[in-house]
Image (tube, rainbow, N blue to C red):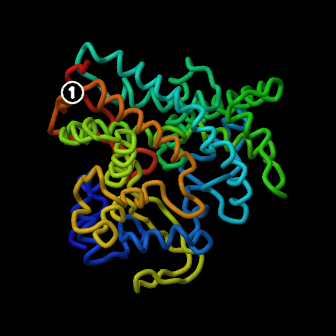
């Protein structure tokens, strides 16, 4: 390859590299990542659908640097190592837990919190309207999804900053980004605090069940499957808190950037005769071009082949959904362009596919739709305060190859 997947500019905007990969080497071995990189839509989707042949469990980091330090703190201060659940397992073990958890994140549950999402979004937007400026991450993109996930679990709203701190600790382990022993001790204490908080909340639901996702987990039953045990409930609940909002923060930040760079889209949505439907379709198109996670890993469990390339058993793969979402074979010759009314926009792979498709996709969609609606209704003339965004404003989120905006300032005029 003439271009490295690991170059900083490709972590932020890899569209030129992705196009080159799809055309020249849709499956290639990257020596820096020691992974087979898969970039075409058809191939990525094919891998996602073969959950047994391409393992998620083996790909998710099950061990990390200074793990023994973190586990030592959890054994002493918390509830020990968390049981591996959801993306850290494969069928058939995954099937049982996912069947239960789907009930807790059902469309009915999301519909119940939709009005709360709308109200929260309006409240946060109203706070900044008179000053005509917003630092998107701190004033909306971070507090909104963390409050929403907290409401879904009926957690105290005043703990949202703690939830963010716990999330950082959770992702630091998942992404193998612990720097040293001191860092590991801090991560361990944060995770122990999270575990103890969740156990206390679960005990409260056992005494007084509520209309929330934690209560759903405690009472979940599906067919002939055994109910979730104590360790599974704790692990799933921690995953909800630790991973239930971080990617949505990235998506909302990117949404402001895209609409500031494409003011014509705001006008298109504002004048649409069926505005709700137009916003839903735009959000799908936005997600197609701006996935908060650019890629996801898998491990081959047997010798196989993708697009004519031999993949030995045990090989690690990186499925670049950010490239698959721009594949001309799937989305046409204008696949690189933002087309709010694109007919097949919802065919994107931003939320993955197959049995490991993102559990919280409906919740993320609802939040992005509400934020878009608020921008269309209340903000005019969005502009980036700093159009040439410096590289220092980006950083890794969840995985080291996933560079995302950490801050973004936007100016606007208040719309009556």
Tell me the residue at 44%/80% (across/down): 306
Find residue 224 and report its horizontal and vertical position in percent.
Answer: 84, 58
| Disc 1 element | strand
Camera-side residue: 339 or 91? Answer: 339
- What residue is shown at x 36% (from left), y 71% (from top)? 40
Drawn side of residue 269 relative to residue 44, left or right: left
Residue closer to the observer: 268 or 297: 268
For the point 37% across and 37% down, the residue is 252
Question: Is residue 237 placed above or below 350 in the rendered structure?
Answer: above
Q: For the view shown, which residue lies furthest in the top direction?
A: 130
Q: Is residue 186 visible?
A: no
Asked whether the viewer can see residue 254, the reply is yes
Image coordinates of residue 95 in percent, x first then y, are: 70, 60
Q: Residue at x 68, y 59 (%)?
A: 94
Q: Is residue 259 above or below residue 359?
A: above
Residue extending furthest toward the front: 273
Number of callouts in the render?
A: 1
Image quadrant holding the C terminus, namely top left
Q: Position of residue 169 (x, y in %)?
A: 53, 37
Q: Position of residue 258 (x, y in %)?
A: 25, 42
Q: Which residue is mark 1?
A: 380
The quadrant of the rendering that contains the N terminus is bottom left
Q: Is residue 120 left or right of residue 104?
A: left
């Amino acid at each position: 390859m003439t271009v490295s997947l690991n170059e900083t500019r490709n972590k932020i905007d890899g569209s030129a590299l992705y196009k080159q990969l799809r055309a020249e080497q849709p499956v290639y071995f990257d020596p820096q990542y020691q992974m087979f990189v898969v970039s075409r839509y058809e191939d990525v989707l094919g891998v996602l659908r073969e959950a047994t042949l391409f393992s998620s469990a083996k790909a998710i980091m099950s061990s990390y640097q200074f793990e023994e330090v973190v586990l030592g703190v959890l054994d002493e201060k918390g509830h020990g190592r968390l049981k591996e659940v959801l993306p850290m397992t494969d069928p058939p073990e995954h099937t049982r837990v996912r069947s239960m958890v789907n009930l807790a994140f059902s469309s009915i549950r999301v519909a119940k919190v939709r009005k709360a999402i709308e109200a929260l979004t309006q409240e946060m937007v109203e706070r900044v309207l008179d000053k005509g400026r917003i630092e998107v991450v701190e004033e909306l993109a971070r507090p909104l999804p963390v409050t929403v996930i907290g409401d879904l679990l009926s957690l105290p709203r005043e703990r949202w900053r703690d939830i963010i701190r716990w999330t950082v600790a959770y992702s630091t382990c998942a992404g193998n980004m612990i720097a040293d022993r001191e860092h590991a001790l801090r991560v361990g204490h944060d995770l122990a605090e999270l575990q103890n908080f969740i156990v206390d909340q679960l005990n409260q639901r056992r005494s007084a069940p509520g209309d929330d996702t934690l209560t759903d987990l405690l009472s979940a039953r599906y067919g002939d499957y055994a109910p979730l045990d104590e360790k599974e409930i704790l692990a799933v609940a921690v995953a909800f808190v630790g991973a239930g909002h971080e990617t949505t923060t990235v998506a909302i930040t990117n949404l402001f950037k895209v609409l500031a760079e494409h003011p014509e889209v705001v006008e298109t949505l504002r004048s649409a005769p069926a505005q709700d439907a137009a916003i839903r379709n735009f959000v799908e198109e936005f997600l197609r071009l701006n996935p908060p996670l650019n890629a996801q890993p898998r491990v081959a469990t047997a010798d196989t082949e993708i697009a004519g390339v031999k993949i030995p058993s045990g090989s690690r793969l990186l499925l670049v959904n950010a490239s698959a979402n721009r594949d001309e074979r799937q989305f046409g010759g204008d696949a690189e362009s933002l087309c709010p009314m694109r007919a097949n926009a919802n065919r994107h792979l931003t939320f993955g596919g197959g049995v490991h498709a993102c559990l919280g996709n409906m919740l993320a969609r609802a939040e992005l739709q509400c934020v878009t609606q608020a921008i269309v209704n209340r903000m005019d003339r969005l502009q980036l305060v700093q159009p040439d965004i410096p590289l220092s404003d980006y950083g890794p989120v969840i995985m080291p190859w996933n560079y995302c905006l950490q801050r973004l300032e936007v100016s606007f005029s208040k719309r009556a």
